Image: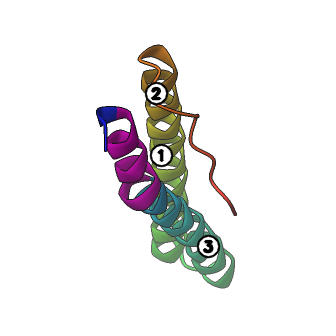
Amino acid sequence: MNGKEIVSQIVGSIIDPLVLLIFSIGIFLFTWGLVVFLSQMDNPDGRKIGVQHMLWGIVGVFIMATVFGIINIILETFGLGDPTQLNF
């Protein structure tokens, strides 16, 4: 097994599932924040908590999209394999 195959195995077996998991957590957190925001319309503190959840969900999804892009740039630059593909 050469270095290219090892990197492909690591990316395919460990990194891709982690990125997908954190994407999912970010989307869930955003959705949960939206539910809290809508259910607490009459409570300013509840709305604030909902907005914070939505904001952190968006931040998480943005960070994971950036990580996904950086991984693909590194793989393409060094010719370590095909770009990763997240299968939703």
**Residue mark closest to the camera, 3 vs 1:** 1
Does residue 67 appear to the left or right of 42 in the view shown? Answer: left
Disc 1 packing (10 Å; few <14; some 14–19; many ≥20) = some
Q: Residue furthest bottom?
A: 39
User: Does the image show residue 80?
Assistant: yes
For residue 49, which quarter of the picture?
A: bottom left
| Cα gap from disc 3 to disc 1, whole angstroms | 24 Å
Disc 2 packing (10 Å; few <14; some 14–19; many ≥20) = some
Q: Which residue is mark 1?
A: 64
Task: Assess whether residue 5 is covered by the magenta stretch.
Answer: yes
Earlier in the chain: of badge 1 and badge 2, it is: 1
Task: Assess whether residue 79 is covered by the magenta stretch.
Answer: no
Mark linked to residue 37:
3
| Residue 19 x %, y % | 46, 55
Q: Secondary structure at mark 3?
A: helix
| Residue 54 x %, y % | 55, 60
Earlier in the chain: of badge 3 and badge 1, it is: 3
**Residue mark closest to the camera, 1 vs 2:** 2
Q: Which residue is mark 2?
A: 75
Q: Is residue 22 above or below residue 73?
A: below
Q: Which residues are magenta?
A: 4-15
Identify which residue is drawn at 48% across, 66% down.
Answer: 21
